[in-house]
Image: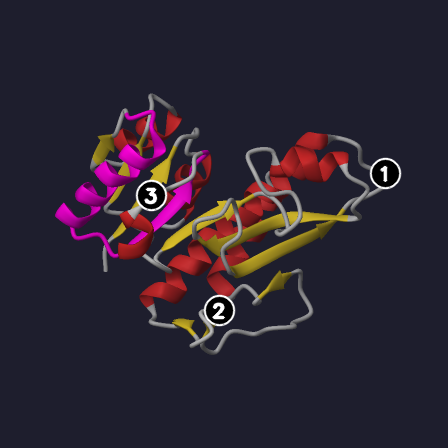
C-alpha cells in the first residue's frame, strides 16, 4: 500500500505525525507551490514533487499521471484547491481530505474561521472522501469539541483542531492499512469494527494509538 499527501500548506500536521509516530510513513509529497510542506518532505527524506500549475483541471491531470507512475493507492489532502476531471474517477473513494470544521457546516477555505465566527457551541474537524463538490464527500471520521465561555483565545481552539487532525490522519491511515476502510453499495463509508456512538467526541471512536496521539498533541498547548 502506497500513500501520497498533497499539500499547499505548512505541512504541520504531517510533520507532527511523523515526529510522534515512527511507524507512520508516506511515499510521496506533492505541492502546487513553494510552502512549508516541502521542507517537511526534505527533512524526512520523503520523495517530493511540485506541480506548478494554476489551472485546477490541468493540475489534476498532471497529478493523476504522477500518482499512476508512482503506483500510489491512496491520497491524503491538506489542500486549498478543488481537484477535477479524470483523477476523481480513477481515485474515487481513495482521495481523503482533512477539513477544519464539522461538515456540512462551514465548508471552504475558511472552515475554522467561519466556525469560530458562528454561534455554534461545538467546533471540530472532518476527514472525508473527495468528490466533485467543495467538502461534500462522505465523512469517514468527525471530531467535535465544545466552545467554552471562559476561553476566547482562538489559538487554543485552533490547537485542538490541529490535535484532532493529527489523530484522525493516523487513524484513517491505520484503518486503510488494516483493510477496515469499507464502502457500502450506497457509497457511504464505514469502518469495519469501528465504534460508532461511543462516549468520546470522535465518531467512530479513536483507537488506542490514535487517542494517545490526540492526548499528547492536545496537551502541548
Question: Can residue 59 be spotted in the picture?
Answer: yes
**Residue density around tag 1, few if under 14, some if 14–19, many if 20 or more, within 10 Å:** few
Tell me which residue sits at (24%, 40%) in the image: 61
Which image quadrant: the C terminus? top right
Foreground pick, 217 / 185: 185
What is the CA distance from the residue labelled 1 to the residue labelled 2?
38 Å
The answer to whether residue 15 is above or below residue 33 is below
> Viewer-nearest of labels 1 and 2?
2
- Residue wearing tag 3: 5
**Residue density around tag 3, few if under 14, some if 14–19, many if 20 or more, within 10 Å:** many
Q: Earlier in the sequence, mark 3 or mark 2?
A: 3
Tell me which residue sits at (50%, 53%) in the image: 127
Give x and y (percent) for residue 186: 47, 74
Q: Residues in magenta? A: 53-80
Label placed on residue 188: 2
Give x and y (percent) for residue 114: 69, 36
The answer to whether residue 80 is above or below residue 179 is above
Quarter of the figure with residue 179: bottom left
Which image quadrant: the N terminus? bottom left
- Residue wearing tag 1: 150
Q: Earlier in the sequence, mark 1 or mark 2?
A: 1
Amino acid at each position: 500500500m502506497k500513500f501520497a499527501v498533497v499539500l499547499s500548506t505548512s505541512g504541520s500536521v504531517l510533520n507532527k505525525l511523523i515526529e510522534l509516530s515512527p511507524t507512520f510513513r508516506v511515499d510521496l509529497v506533492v505541492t502546487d507551490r513553494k510552502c512549508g510542506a516541502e521542507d517537511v518532505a526534505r527533512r524526512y527524506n520523503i520523495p517530493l514533487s511540485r506541480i506548478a500549475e494554476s489551472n485546477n483541471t490541468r493540475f489534476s491531470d498532471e497529478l493523476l499521471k504522477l500518482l499512476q507512475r508512482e503506483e500510489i493507492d491512496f491520497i491524503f489532502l491538506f489542500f486549498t484547491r478543488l481537484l477535477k476531471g479524470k483523477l476523481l474517477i480513477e481515485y474515487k473513494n481513495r482521495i481523503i481530505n482533512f477539513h477544519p470544521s464539522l461538515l456540512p457546516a462551514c465548508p471552504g477555505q475558511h472552515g475554522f474561521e467561519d466556525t469560530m465566527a458562528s454561534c455554534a457551541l461545538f467546533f471540530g474537524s472532518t476527514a472525508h472522501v473527495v468528490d466533485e463538490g467543495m467538502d461534500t464527500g462522505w465523512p469517514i471520521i468527525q471530531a467535535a469539541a465544545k466552545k467554552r465561555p471562559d476561553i476566547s483565545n482562538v489559538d487554543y481552539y485552533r490547537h485542538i483542531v490541529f490535535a484532532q487532525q493529527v489523530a484522525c490522519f493516523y487513524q484513517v491511515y491505520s484503518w486503510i492499512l488494516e483493510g477496515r476502510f469499507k464502502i457500502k453499495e450506497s457509497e457511504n463509508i464505514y469502518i469495519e469494527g469501528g465504534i460508532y456512538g461511543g462516549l468520546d467526541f470522535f465518531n467512530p471512536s479513536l483507537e488506542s494509538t490514535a487517542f494517545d496521539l490526540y492526548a499528547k498533541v492536545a496537551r502541548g498547548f
